[in-house]
Amino acid sequence: MNLPVIKSAILAAMPFMLLFIAGIVDAIGFIHLKNGLFVSFMSGNTTHVAMLLSSHQYSQSLSYIGVILLFVTGITVGEMIAVLQKKNYRWLVMSAVSILLCSAIFIEKITIPMATNFVLAFAMGLQNIALRITISKAMPLTFATAFLANTGRELAMLLLGQGDKNIFIKQFCLWLSIFIGAIVGSQLMAFSLSYALVVPIMLCLCISGLLFWLRALTDGE
């Protein structure tokens, strides 16, 4: 068994796995409230806040503002973990995401639905930091528009005979990971929130375990 090759393959697949989870959780959060509020797609929430504020619907905008702030807070906390725990932050971050998703199941049973989405938004913000596992620069996990833009740009270069087919396929598959994740999340919500969240929780735990195993290899990247 070629261990370095296996490790490299896992690292290469990590962005797609994390984007898949983000798509699942975003669909779960959106369907949970049924009001057009996303827990990881902040571009949509930003536009919605702007429209609500422009029409003086201030009370309705508070939930969107809260989700955006908690998403940013999650990223901030993740960065702090990364700085303070350089050797272990990747698996620690994903373990924290797993715990937050588990807590959302219990919170949903004892308080208002919005509180659950606040927890999910914080978890998705935190998860953004884990994508540093495979790239030197941070890449937002939920910026689907960027992946589509990159896909279009690479397609243009291919049509001009100057592109790289592998880069085009990668960018398209990054977007596709979110898309398929959202489909899965929508199907899971046909049952219940508690049932639906079990899938991303299990995936996060598996990823946390993999990152713990790979921590020596990925230090300093």
Image (cartoon, rainbow, N blue to C red):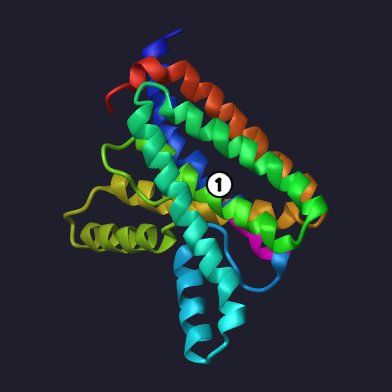
Which amino acid does the dot numbered 1 rest on? Answer: Ala
Residues drawn in magenta: 26-32
Left or right, 147 with reference to 16: left
Q: Reply yes or no: does residue 30 show up in magenta.
A: yes
Query: With respect to residue 9, does 64 lie above or below?
Result: below
Left or right, 162 with reference to 130: left
Query: With respect to residue 94, does 159 lie above or below?
Result: below
**Could you say which is closer to the camera, residue 147 or residue 35?**
35
Looking at the image, the residue that sits furthest to the bottom is 55
Query: With respect to residue 121, does 20 lie above or below?
Result: above
**Could you say which is closer to the camera, residue 37 or residue 217?**
37
Q: Reply yes or no: does residue 155 show up in magenta.
A: no
Question: Does residue 177 appear in this view?
Answer: no
- Name the quadrant containing residue 209: top right
| Residue indicated by mark 1 | 123
**Could you say which is closer to the camera, residue 202 or residue 80?**
80
- Name the quadrant containing residue 217: top left
Residue drawn at point x = 70 percent, y = 47 percent: 104
Residue drawn at point x = 52 percent, y = 92 percent: 55
Q: Main secondary structure of the magenta part?
A: helix
**Could you say which is closer to the camera, residue 41 or residue 69?**
69
